[in-house]
Amino acid sequence: MRARGWEIVERVRAGEVLVFDGGYGTELFAAGLANGACPELWNDTHADTVRRIHKGYFDAGSQIVETNTFGGSRLKLNEYRIGDRTRELNERGARLARSVAPADGFVAGSIGPTSRLPAEYEPLGDTTDEEYFEAFREQAAALAEGGVDLFAVETMMFPQEARAAVRACKAVAELPVMATMFFQFEELHDRDRTMWGESPGEVATTLLAAGADAVGMNCGRGPDRAVVIIREMRAVTGAPLVAYPNAGLPITQGDRVAYELGPEEMAKDYPALLDAGAGIVGACCGSNPAHIRRIAEVVRARGR
Ligand SMILES: [Zn+2]
């Protein structure tokens, strides 16, 4: 039987827009996660809090919610000396989100960067494509075991790492993969590029070639740049496109970080984002359920 997650790809291809969720860091810090602590560990120690955050997004109108496993690869968990808990923390993460998902809700297994630089990135890089692949294969297998409907490879900075993650997901499960990268706005050139210097069109092309079923952008700047990035991706592909930008730029206030855009201001750009071709939309850093509620209203107001 074909996994239920494929329904997402079919619905977006048929013209429907689906609502993704919002930021987790903000919510976890608000719940007491200490700076420098491992967020994925909370899938064990603070399961009720994690479940409550997931439920908050489903209640706000998210149709797809992602797991609290962004830094759940062994390479990343090793930084906290808990690499040996990779399988357990990812499986737990998947089950937590699943436990509060409504019957028609979807769970995306979040796979973020390892924080290790690719070998080609001299002189600091040391990680080969094979090492990336192994780390993501292990994480993706545990997420699939925990019952995710699809994978969300996200906030990727380097194409090598992003491609390895997509291939690893495809190697362990017959589930859809959405893959999104982090773009920087280069004000001087008025353009958006990855850390590796790729354009949005190049990213879409390479990630689709690696096997992704939906591609796009997340994190980075605010929705105004997301509109431009998605438009450029749409120019090179008819594939489902995804956008979940940050709530604008971070503003540091003492030891706290706030973000520019409130729910109302952020949602203003979403009609243009839908026009640009985004079929799955949500928000990233600095957003909360209030942002998603407004974004979901924009999506619903537009109809199909
Ligand atoms: Zn973000």
Image (cartoon, rainbow, N blue to C red):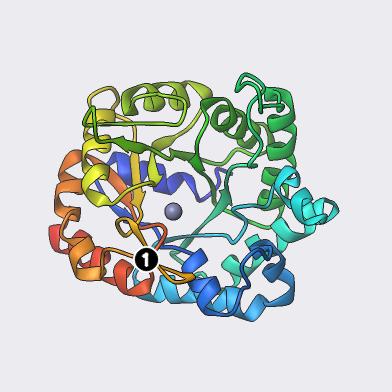
Residue 297 in the image: above or below residue 195:
below
Q: Give the camera-side residue of 286 and 244.
A: 286
What residue is pinned by disc 1?
287
Q: Is residue 102 visible?
A: no
Q: Residue at x 22, y 25 (%)?
A: 235
Q: Residue at x 60, y 72 (%)?
A: 99
Residue 230 in the image: above or below residue 108:
above
**As drawn, is 173 to the left or to the right of 195?**
right
The three-letter amino acid code for the residue at tag 1 is Ser
Residue 146, quarter of picture: bottom right
Q: Residue at x 59, y 73 (%)?
A: 50
User: Which residue in the rendered view is the most extreme toward the front?
Assistant: 254
- Residue 225: x and y in percent read 25, 43
Residue 162, quarter of picture: top right
**As drawn, is 136 to the left or to the right of 240?**
right
- Residue 127: x and y in percent read 71, 28
Q: Quadrant of the N terminus?
A: top right
- Residue 70: x and y in percent read 59, 53
User: Which residue in the rendered view is the most extreme toward the right?
Assistant: 84
Residue 293, quarter of picture: bottom left
